Amino acid sequence: MIINEKMQRIVLIILLLCLSFKCTVLGDVNTKWNRFSPSSPAALLLTEKDFCSKLRSLPKRAHFASIEDYGAIGDGETLNTQAFHDAISHLSAFSNQGGSQLYIPPGRWLTGNFNVTSHFTLFIDKDAVILGSQNPRDWPVVDPLPSYGRGRELPGGRHISLIYGNNLSDVIITGNNGTIDGQGKVWWELHANGSLDYTRGHLLELMNSKDIIISNLTFINSPFWNIHPVYCRNVLIQYLTILAPIDSSNTDGIDPDSSSRVCIEDCYVENGDDLVSIKSGWDEYGIRYGRPSSKIVIRRLAGATRSSAGVAIGSEMSGGVSHVYVYDLKVGHASTGVRIKSAQGRGGYVKHVYVSDVVLRNVKTAIAFTGLYGEHPDDLYDPNALPHVHTIYIQNVKGDNVTMAGNFQGLPGYPYRDIFLRNITLNVTSRKVVWNCSYLTGYSESVSPPPCAALVQKATKKNSASTSIS
């Protein structure tokens, strides 16, 4: 009798566990969707509105100067690099005395690289243009990033950005829609004909820094990526216009890299690469450095790029990327709307990505994930370091004149898991391949045209939320 009672208890426990598992697999799908909405508690927790709002109030500075006070001439021809260095060197003395602000008045201020300082505001007047020198020698070569192991384009070092800072706090680069012009054409041509010895420089890069605001400016004609916060936290990027010719190579708009708590809001980008690309290091170097990107909020982003994506993650994602929230994305004339790029040898992960309210027009592929991107820094990468991509939610997407709905290329043994698509309506022009799926499991609801078999319709008791790999 005692044995029977024990057996009954064991059977009861097993039944309860099975029921619990079944509810988790089947019932939690709708629960997860209900949690994901712009006003839901989970979304508010994810976006952590407080960390964005704390950065929206510009601090008052106690000390002010104009670049003209240091002998700069805004005629578009005089090189003012030394004036910028002198101004910021002098103003850095006030970092602990209420901070400082450097004013750039109307004019065209030609300069090479200069470094900003802590507790500092660079304010660019609406009729002012900071012009990047077209002489590569005015963009000195610096060490490669430790999470990349080399320059992104070429082995060795890399040209420093036009505006640079390292180990800083409380940095504001703003204005009333003043302009930073990288005059990148000469760089694009040098890159195209193989005449550069080092990777091109960005317009703006801040490293190992915190409490950063970049706002109310226009960035044009960057030699390479435009805005690159790397190893940073607490970054607000808002009200920017970023422009480059659509055929300019690798002119990414905003690339948060191994950074956390980054808000990108109300920006327009039209360029020759991704509007926004989230990164975290490259192959064995990124794995070793181990600095992820997390808590990235992208809201009200619009733009166009014929060669690349509206929002991309990777392909350099070896340190991991998680908790990315994208809301209100409008993309036209792009290769891809939303894209995740990884490769064998990358390692790392991409997980907990939430995308909602997307409008696409004249886009080749609406949604594309690939584990076959390639591009390695050297031959030292571990081919067994495979990326983990899972828990991706994409909903409320409309697309007009879209060539292909979705292209998912996972890796054998490491499929994309828990890919959730809901309320997606695409006007697809292709009559051949509408969806392409390999090594993928997931779930879909109200998706038109109907997705591939790996993204099954809404789960029921007879139909699991996950399917076998196809």
Image (cartoon, rainbow, N blue to C red):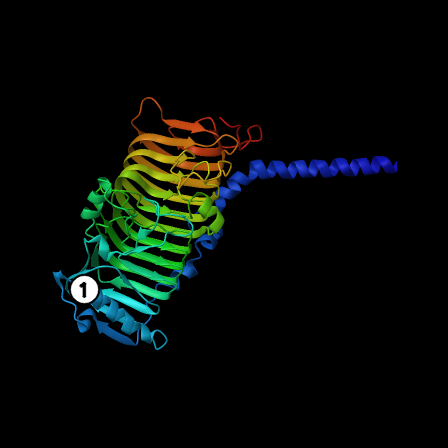
Amino acid on which disc 1 is placed = Asn
Binning the other alpha carbons within 10 Å of mark 1 as few (below 14), some (14 to 19) or many (20 upward) gives many
Place of residue 280 in the rendered image (x, y in percent of width and height, measured from the top left): 42, 48
Is residue 465 something that shows in the picture?
yes
Q: In this view, does 279 lie to the left or right of 332?
A: right
Where 174 falls versus 370 (above or below)?
A: below
Question: Seen from this angle, which residue lies furthest right?
Answer: 1
The residue lying toward the viewer, choosing from 441 and 307, is 307
Place of residue 383 in the rendered image (x, y in percent of width and height, measured from the top left): 48, 36
Place of residue 403 in the rendered image (x, y in percent of width and height, measured from the top left): 30, 29
Residue linked to disc 1 = 80
Residue 274 image-quadrant placement: top left
What residue is rendered at 84% in x and 35% in y? Answer: 4
Residue 88 image-quadrant placement: bottom left
Q: In this view, does 150 lie to the left or right of 17?
A: left
Where 181 falls versus 456 (above or below)?
A: below
**SS state under label 1:** loop
What residue is rendered at 21% in x and 44% in y? Answer: 190
Is residue 450 something that shows in the picture?
no
Residue 211 image-quadrant placement: bottom left
